[in-house]
Image: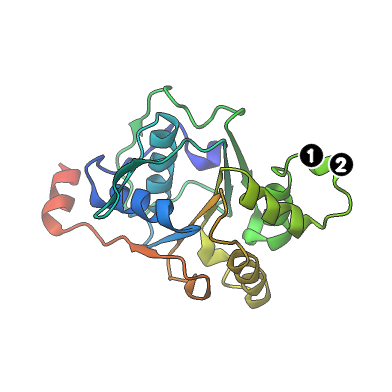
Amino acid sequence: LDLLGWKEYVEPDPQNPYVQKLCDELARHQGVEIFGEGGLGKTALAYQFIRRNLNDDTTSHSRLGGDQKIKRFEKFAIITSKSRHQGERETVHFRVDRKGDPRNPSRSIAEYNPHGRYQGFIDRVADLYPGSQGRGHLSPEEKALHAIIERPILVVIDNYEDIVKDDDNHKKYIEFLTEIPAHAKGRIIVTSRPPAMGKTNFPVIKMKPFRPPNIHELLL
């Protein structure tokens, strides 16, 4: 858990359009990909969504349907290949309050998955399937898929750029993610440096580098 930096991290501005964009896309799609250079706050954006969702502060906007509150997810699973704190641009850390703390083990699980191994990802998500220990007739992939379909869980696949380094590994992920139906209760957030979710039809949120005036202010 220490590797995930739950206690201290660069938190995007609450008024930042990326936050609202993430809420809007998660309300309409099974998954969302966040990509951009290292240190721009891709993982922090996912963390902020989780903390706001725990505090019942996530709302999607629609021109036709108006504002709709995104219901609180039952469980959060953060699966990362990070072996250390990352963020080339991170120079300031902000301590978060304990309200809606995502470190609460009843709410979230986090796992270091070296190289983003597919089987490690599947095993972790399969554990979230209700009664998974007594469903021996289902394969781990089937349990994982049903967990996402039947339960309002949010799965974060962090540092997907490590996964695409292995073509076979990447192919297995894509095949699994494309099987998630539109009526699934669960959602997926993928963070990556190059966009890699093309075949899944996940919408993409591209994070751009800070503009020079913003960088100047941060360094003061």
Q: Which residue is mark 2?
A: 134
Considering the numbered disc 1 on the image, is that residue within a helix, a strand or a loop?
loop
Residue tagged by mark 1?
Answer: 131
Q: Secondary structure at mark 2?
A: helix
Q: Examine the rendering and report whether any part of residue 80 can be seen.
A: yes
Percent coordinates x, y for residue 116 in the rendering: 63, 60
Percent x, y for residue 14? 26, 39
Residue 7 found in image quarter: top left
Q: Identify the image quadrant of the N terminus.
A: top right
Asked where in the image residue 166 lies, by quadrant, the reply is: bottom right
Q: Amino acid at mark 1?
A: Gly
Q: Residue at x 56, y 71 (%)?
A: 164
Q: Residue at x 11, y 53 (%)?
A: 213
Q: What's the amino acid at mark 2?
A: Gly
**In which quarter of the view is residue 29 placed?**
bottom left
Residue at the image point whose x is 49% and y is 70% from the top = 197
